[in-house]
Image (tube, rainbow, N blue to C red):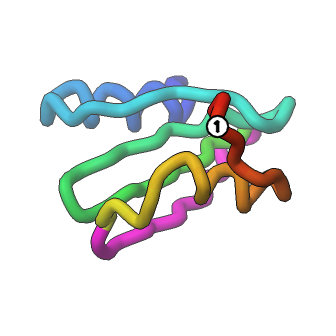
Amino acid sequence: MSHPIYDLLDKLDETECSYVLSRHRDNSVLVSIRSVDEHIEVEVFEDGNIEISRFSGKEDMVGGLEIVCELLGKKPTDDD
């Protein structure tokens, strides 16, 4: 019996869809799929459960390093 992660990866490979695998939890693998106007995250758990989050919309540039510094609670310096 195949695990759902392999079924998903086989389907993505068949369609030549680009994806990235990562781990943020001990019991799951995150498959991130991006297109021009959409980002889909598929979290596949060791028990075969699957959770999908879908993000769509514009991915316009909103700024530079100052945005990252703001998120981190720092002020940009001339050295950054």
Judge by depth and name the residue closer to the eye, 57 or 32: 57
Question: In the rendering, at what x and y percent does residue 8 appear?
Answer: 39, 37
Question: In the rendering, at what x and y percent does residue 1 appear?
Answer: 54, 24
Say above or below: 36 vs 12: below
Under mark 1, the amino acid is: Asp
Question: In the rendering, at what x and y percent does residue 13 appear?
Answer: 23, 25
Report if residue 30 lies within the magenta region. Answer: no
Say above or below: 6 vs 28: above
Left of 5 or right of it: where is 43?
right
Judge by depth and name the residue closer to the eye, 43 or 59: 59
Report if residue 51 lies within the magenta region. Answer: yes
Which residue appears farthest toward the front when viewing the image?
A: 78
Residue for point 44% across, 67% down: 54
Left of 25 or right of it: where is 21?
left
Badge 1 is on which residue?
78
Residue for point 85% across, 30% down: 26
* 10 Å crowding of disc 1: few (<14), some (14-19), many (20+): few
Residue 63: quadrant of the picture: bottom left
Residue 20: quadrant of the picture: top left
Judge by depth and name the residue closer to the eye, 44 or 32: 32
Which residue appears farthest toward the bottom when viewing the image?
A: 57
Say above or below: 52 vs 42: below
**Mark count:** 1
Q: Is residue 43 visible?
A: yes
Residue for point 72% across, 61% down: 70
Question: In the rendering, at what x and y percent does residue 59 appear?
Answer: 32, 64
Which residue appears farthest toward the left when viewing the image?
A: 15
Judge by depth and name the residue closer to the eye, 1 or 11: 11
Residues rendered magenta in the picture: 47-58
Residue 56: quadrant of the picture: bottom left
